[in-house]
Amino acid sequence: MDAQPVELQPVDAVEVTILIDNVMDALLPGAPNVQRAPLRWESFEQAPLLAEHGFSALLTVEQQGRRASILYDVGMGRNTLVHNMDVLGVNPAEIRAIVLSHGHTDHHGGLSGLLARLGPRQMPLILHPDA
């Protein structure tokens, strides 16, 4: 199968939100181009972000005032992704597609929890045939 070239369009902004990573350090400071999840000292009952062996990122592009997001990997645990989305205020219904980097469980295990949250819907799932 021959790969077809993809014509990329310029965008006004790109935002990467890490939803799951191997570690989470709530005390790391932000930076001019890095916004950390807010600490909620006023209420220790607020659920913290969860870390686990795995990865997930939300990639959002903005072009002429319109925003579109794809989900790149979904972590390992069934509920970790949806939990962290809730903590960060990410609406999973706004995701336009899911891309899986490869077939290891720590990159696709969270699909069942996400699909349970979203319910049946038509959404592209992009992955390599060997995955």
Image (spheres, rainbow, N blue to C red):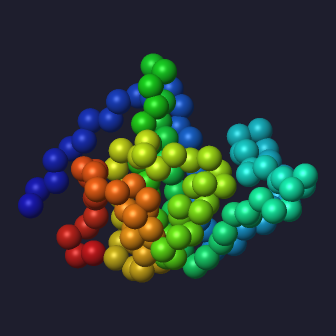
Report x, y in % for residue 29.
84, 52
Q: Is residue 78 left or right of residue 125?
A: right
User: Please, which residue is most extreme toward the left here?
Assistant: 1
Question: Residue visible at 66% across and 69% down?
Answer: 50
Report x, y in % for residue 39.
83, 54
Report x, y in % for residue 12.
50, 26
Q: Is residue 48 left or right of residue 104?
A: right
Report x, y in % for residue 101.
38, 66
For the question of whether residue 53 can be seen, the reply is yes
In the rendered view of the protein, which quadrant contains the N terminus? bottom left
What number of labels is visible?
0
Indicate the quadrant where residue 41 lies: bottom right
Q: Nearer the viewer, residue 123 or 130?
A: 123
User: Please, which residue is most extreme toward the right here?
Assistant: 42
Question: Residue visible at 48% across and 21% down?
Answer: 65
Vertical relation: 30 (above or below) 76: above
Q: Nearer the viewer, residue 45 or 102?
A: 45
Question: Residue visible at 60% across and 54% down?
Answer: 86
Question: Residue visible at 42% across and 46% down?
Answer: 93
Vertical relation: 31 (above or below) 110: above
In the rendered view of the protein, which quadrant contains the C terminus? bottom left
For the question of whether residue 18 can be seen, the reply is no
